[in-house]
Image (spheres, grey):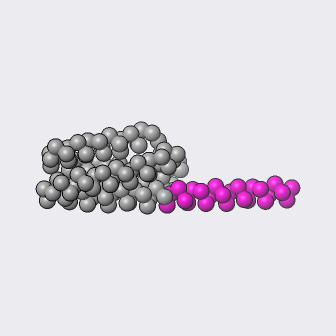
Amino acid sequence: MVKNVITLILSIIILISAGIWQIDYLNKTSMYAMSDTEYIKNLIQNDNFKLANEHIKELENTWNGMKDTWNIFVTHDEIDDVEEAMTNFKMYTLQENKEEALVYAQQIHQNLNHIAKNQQVRFENIF
């Protein structure tokens, strides 16, 4: 009986700890990627496409590092939305299409923010 209670308590502690780590990881990595996107967006607004293209490569590396872990916690549809927006963001930045690049920068920001907020423990997310 005591073994079962201890096992149950340890399982609950591990589950809660893993949940807290997951939320923290998603928040930190999404904020990091959103700040990279914001920086690139500012470069594009200032017509500095050369530097923006260099930083998009860094953003892609950041995203590729995050993506594998995110696939464990986030639906594939949401991951696909971020990837599609990043592909378009890169394409329009390479083409120096300021308006479209800014649209996709905003979409990346919204997608990442949406994912991070959906993973948080809130009453609406539970029921």
Q: Nearer the viewer, residue 38 or 50?
A: 50
Residue drawn 49% across the image and 61% down it:
24
Q: Residue furthest left?
A: 47
Examine the rendering and report whether any part of residue 44 can be seen.
Answer: no
Is 32 on the left-hand or right-hand side of 41?
right
**Quarter of the image where one finds residue 19:** bottom right
Residue 49 lies, in percent from the top left, at 17, 53
Q: In the image, is residue 42 above or below residue 53?
A: below
Q: Position of residue 126 (x, y in %)?
A: 53, 50
Residue lying at 50% horizontally and 49% vertically, measured from the top left: 69
Q: Is residue 2 left or right of residue 48?
A: right
Residue 51, by quadrant, is bottom left
124 vs 57, left or right, is: right
Return the residue nearer the eye: 2 or 96.
Answer: 96
Q: State the count of labels.
A: 0
User: In this view of the protein, can residue 57 be seen by the observer?
Assistant: yes
Dominant SS in magenta = helix
Location of residue 67 in the rendering, given as x and y in whole percent from the top left corner: 44, 47
- Residue 21 is inside the magenta segment: yes
In this view, 108 is above or below 6: above
Quadrant in the picture for the N terminus: bottom right
Relative side of 18 to 47, left or right: right
Q: Is residue 46 above or below residue 72?
A: below
- Residue for point 35% across, 42% down: 83
Instruction: Give the residues drawn in magenta, as a range.
Output: 1-24
Give x and y (percent) for residue 30.
40, 56
Query: At x 35% / y 45%, what residue is drawn?
Result: 82
Q: Residue furthest right?
A: 1
